[in-house]
Amino acid sequence: MNFRRRDIAIAGTIAGAALAASIPARAQPKLSDSTWELIKKNGAVRMGVFEYPPYFVRNKQSGEWEGAMVDMGRDIANELKVKFQPVEVGGFAESVLSLQAGKVDMNFGLQATPIRATAIDFAGPIYWIEWVTVNSKNFKGKDWADYNDPKVKVAVMTGTSDELLLRKMAPKATRVEFKLIADVALAVSSGRADAFTTTVLASMVMKSKNPDLGDFMNPKPRVALPGYIGLRYEEDQRWQKFLDKWSEWNILLGHNERRMREALSKDGLEVPATVSCSPASRRAMTAIRTTPTPAPASASCRPAAMAWSRTASSATTATPATATPAPRPA
């Protein structure tokens, strides 16, 4: 995994000037103990959470946090034989600051963008996921070129990879930014924006909860990215090494993919058979890092499988292509 951290960090230095403006110097306190030592001393691991189904969901009856990534966090705590402590943070926009300030020990579902890589470290990846768009009923965009127009308003969550991806794939689009995913979906269903973009699973949930949303699209060129665990930079690498191996073990055994599917099923949704959130192999993981974007047409949550049909017009329906099940270690 060292090659990944080095490569990402080098790329991140290019964006150093922008980082200085976005990350306050006071956000990086001097912590006397490493994260690994703090977890052992406190008997708990703290994970950043916020409303973002199916990854982070607060149960309305019990008040407990649930979701695919919450389940991952609980498993990490169980492995360490410590308590799991969810800590509310202000969405992905606060993912860096909450780590630097020592508010949490880990934040899940982050893409290792160049800016983030100059401020925090990463472990993983924990899954692969494709980005899609959901249109308003009056907008018929299909490919990124259709969104790349100043007249087209695209809603995104502030400080997320959704925002960065839109800047790359449709730089001329007018961005409409919101802190919460629910507000993003509402902007489109109410006509304040023409479309929104986010991960395929989050899009499925938002569309199922908002009948006034329009078509669910897989714009070309297709884009699939890995998600990581964010953590603080520190000399003691035991926490990072633990998370790296936990991620590798759970993604290759299919545990994280199972957690994704189970979380989605709580909203009455089923991931098509062609969707996988696991890489087919470590070779495929390496290939996707070294292959220029966009991701191959056959890739979505993982490099070697899964082609979502662009004919899918709703979040709950997709036409499966021929799928190859992810191999499991012997």
Image (cartoon, helix red, strand yellow):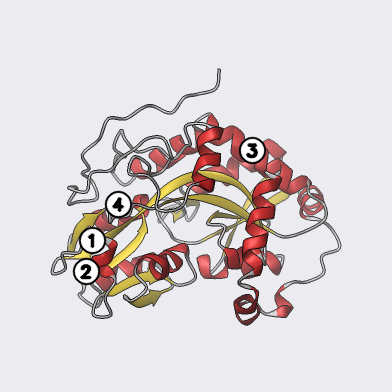
Q: Which mark is residue 257?
A: none
Tell me the quarter of the image containing the N terminus: top right
Residue at the spot 26% in from the left edge and 69% down from the top edge: 147
Mark 3 residue type: Trp
Position of the C terminus, as image quadrant, is top right
- Please state if 45 lies on the left or on the right of 35 as rendered: left
Residue 97 versus residue 75: which sits nearer the camera? 97
Mark identifier at residue 246: 3
Q: Are marks 4 and 3 in contact (CB under 8 Å)?
A: no
Which residue corresponds to mark 1?
210
Which of the two residues, 11 or 133, is positioned nearer the viewer here? 11
Asked if residue 238 shows in the view, the reply is: yes
Q: Amino acid at mark 2?
A: Ser
Q: Residue 33's spot in the image, x, y percent?
A: 84, 58
Earlier sequence position, callout 1 versus callout 3: 1
Give the residue at the far bottom of this rendering: 21
> Which residue is identified by label 4?
204
3D distance between C-alphas at marks 1 and 3: 36 Å
N-terminal of the two: label 1 or label 4? 4
Residue neighbourhood size for the residue with mark 1, other residues' Cα within 10 Å, grouped as few (<14), some (14–19), many (≥20) = some
Residue at point 52% right, 70% down? 93
From this viewpoint, is residue 98 visible?
A: no
N-terminal of the pair, mark 2 or mark 1, is 2
Dot 2 corresponds to which residue? 189
Q: Disc 4 residue type? A: Met
Residue at 54 percent across and 57 percent down: it is 110
The CA span between labels 4 and 3 is: 28 Å
